[in-house]
């Protein structure tokens, strides 16, 4: 018989109130952050994301994109306000927020830390306090969404980079998040794996915030684009329009696809 | 790199593979303990123990040579026992002159040395047998079931997961060094001291990279709700056959102890 090893001290299932329709999934207002070593990373960032929007976050290395992403579920905490589905990001809300923001790190070897695929995908739901049947259902569903059914008992270190990326996305889909946040999803992928990952991202109907250097990906997949440089948002608008502006792209270390 | 470099598991459909991992861990520890407690020079008992190991590997469909081949790796470690040859008092059989020192080889010392070699060799074979018939993740769960502290099991689990990443990382560092270390024609080149310093720097690099990675892994865990507790779902349960196997091995251990002292 299967046994659930959920510690009796574990928190009860995290059930967040469903936000009213029309409310932004993510509201960031005047967010600033300086690293403990004094290096300033974000200066008064404001960004509002509506439900179902897919937004590309572009800008040179060191512009602050990854720093912003770590703020979205409270791993880093700066000055200013962040609301996720109407909930302010603060210590008390952290368990709720972490289930709502599915953060996928750039290097899947950082994201997949468990011995087997099943354990990695189950990690989030287990820590949200769901009973075993729910955890198994969520794992099956998440693996199905990324097209990796049948990988349950595989060992993470035996997978290819493309497979690892998909499993990394499944590890947050299993938490059924409100918003999917991806850091450089196509970095290090061969053209075929890249294409199939783009198809996967297109098939997911979630709200998405994706940091990337892959300008063709931006053009193909995102209606809205936000340009970051030196810790500030320097442009925010429809992708087609911003990609026309060669001078703007040039000025911030980007190029037309 | 070859991901199976450290993976010792051999997938087979056998009775031994199907046993509960808890039972297997306890059996392995018991068997090793029984082995270690056999008196010096109990050759017949050693032989019977080895026969049992062979029997189990055949039952596990690993073939007779598998465990012995793999156990060779551990042989250099028995050199640690060499001092036993000279340190046990008894009838001298030979003497070694080492400068001002005179080392006396005794008969009892030789017997003890040989016994230590055989014991450790058999024990390594038992451990290999355990690793070859049990999935590593199952082994971790078994340790948790046996009340090994959470922290220790977590450390072993991360070790296992990141051993591969670390090995890859060091391979890349070595390649980067080799790619920039041409030798002048006709030999020569830089001194051993210089090369040692480069190696030292590489170890430092590896440490720093691992340290930074641990930060990123921790962030990834936090992002999915980690609060200091590692939770697992685990499908293991002890059945009659597991208890039976455990009982058989316990009986075997006790009888071989008695036999070796007759």
Image (cartoon, rainbow, N blue to C red):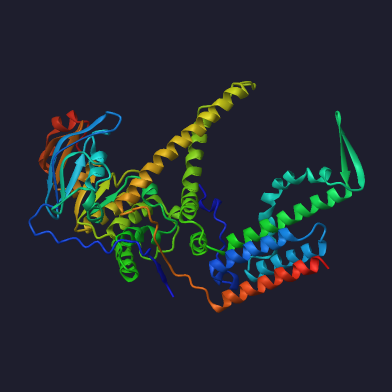
Q: Which quadrant would residue B122 be assigned to in this image?
A: bottom right
Q: Nearer the viewer, residue B31 or B14?
A: B31
Q: Nearer the viewer, residue B140 or B18?
A: B140
Quadrant showing the C terminus of chain A: top left
Give percent across and percent down for residue B191. Answer: 61, 21
Give percent across and percent down for residue A225. Answer: 15, 43
Q: Which quadrant would residue B47 be assigned to in this image?
A: bottom right
Work out whether A209 lies above or below A144: above
Query: Residue lying farthest left?
Result: A22
Number of marks in the image? Answer: 0
A228 relative to B261 in the view: left or right: left
Quadrant showing the N terminus of chain A: bottom left
Q: Residue at x 38, y 47 (%)?
A: A110
Residue B60 in sight from this viewpoint = yes
B90 relative to B194 in the view: left or right: right
Q: Residue at x 35, y 58 (%)?
A: A123
Q: Residue at x 54, y 66 (%)?
A: B21
Give percent across and percent down for residue B95. Answer: 90, 39
B120 relative to A250 in the view: left or right: right
Query: Residue lying farthest front?
Result: A9
Q: Residue at x 19, y 49 (%)?
A: A221
Give percent across and percent down for residue A178. Answer: 19, 56
Residue A213 in sight from this viewpoint = no
Work out whether A205 lies above or below A105: below
């Amino acid at each position: 018989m299967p046994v659930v090893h959920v510690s009796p001290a574990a928190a009860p299932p995290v059930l967040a109130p469903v936000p009213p329709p029309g409310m932004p999934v993510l509201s960031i207002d005047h967010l600033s952050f300086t690293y403990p070593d004094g290096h300033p990373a974000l200066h008064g960032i404001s960004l509002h994301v509506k439900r179902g929007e897919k937004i590309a976050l572009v800008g040179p290395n060191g512009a602050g994109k990854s720093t912003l992403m770590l703020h979205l579920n409270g791993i880093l905490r700066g000055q200013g306000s962040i609301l996720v589905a109407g909930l302010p990001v603060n210590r008390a809300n952290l368990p709720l927020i972490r289930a709502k923001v599915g953060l996928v790190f750039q290097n899947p070897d950082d994201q997949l830390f468990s011995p087997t695929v099943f354990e990695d995908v189950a990690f989030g739901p287990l820590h949200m306090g769901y009973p075993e049947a729910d955890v198994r259902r969520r794992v099956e569903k998440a693996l199905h969404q990324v097209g990796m059914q049948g990988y349950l008992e595989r060992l993470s270190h035996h997978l290819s980079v493309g497979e690892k990326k998909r499993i990394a996305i499944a590890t947050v889909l299993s938490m059924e998040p409100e918003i999917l946040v991806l850091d450089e999803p196509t970095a290090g992928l061969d053209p075929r794996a890249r294409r199939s990952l783009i198809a996967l991202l297109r098939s997911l109907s979630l709200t998405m915030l994706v940091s990337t250097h892959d300008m063709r990906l931006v053009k193909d997949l995102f209606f809205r684009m936000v340009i970051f440089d030196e810790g500030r948002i320097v442009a925010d608008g429809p992708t087609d329009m911003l990609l026309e502006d060669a001078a703007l792209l040039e000025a911030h270390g980007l190029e037309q696809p | 790199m070859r991901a199976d470099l450290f993976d010792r598991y051999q997938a087979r459909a056998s009775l031994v593979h199907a046993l509960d991992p808890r039972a297997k861990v306890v059996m392995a520890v018991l068997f090793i303990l029984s082995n270690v407690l056999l008196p010096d020079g109990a050759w017949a008992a050693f032989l019977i123990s080895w026969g049992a190991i062979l029997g189990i590997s055949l039952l596990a469909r690993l073939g007779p040579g598998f465990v012995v081949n793999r156990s060779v790796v551990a042989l250099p470690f028995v050199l640690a026992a060499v001092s036993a040859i000279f340190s046990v008092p008894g009838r001298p059989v030979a003497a070694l002159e080492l400068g001002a020192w005179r080392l006396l080889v005794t008969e009892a010392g030789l017997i003890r040395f040989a016994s230590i070699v055989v014991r450790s060799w058999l024990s390594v074979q038992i451990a290999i047998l355990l690793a070859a018939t049990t999935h590593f993740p199952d082994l971790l769960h078994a340790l948790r079931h046996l009340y090994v502290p959470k922290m220790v099991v977590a450390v072993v689990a991360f070790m296992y997961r990141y051993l591969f990443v670390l090995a890859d990382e060091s391979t890349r560092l070595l390649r980067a060094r080799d790619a920039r270390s041409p030798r002048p024609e006709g030999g020569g080149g830089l001194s051993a001291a210089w090369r040692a310093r480069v190696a030292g720097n590489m170890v430092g690099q590896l440490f720093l990279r691992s340290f930074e990675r641990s930060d990123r892994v921790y962030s990834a865990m936090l992002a999915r709700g980690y609060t200091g507790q590692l939770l697992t779902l685990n499908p293991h349960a002890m059945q009659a056959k597991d208890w039976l196997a455990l009982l058989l091995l316990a009986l075997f251990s006790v009888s071989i102890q008695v036999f070796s002292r007759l």
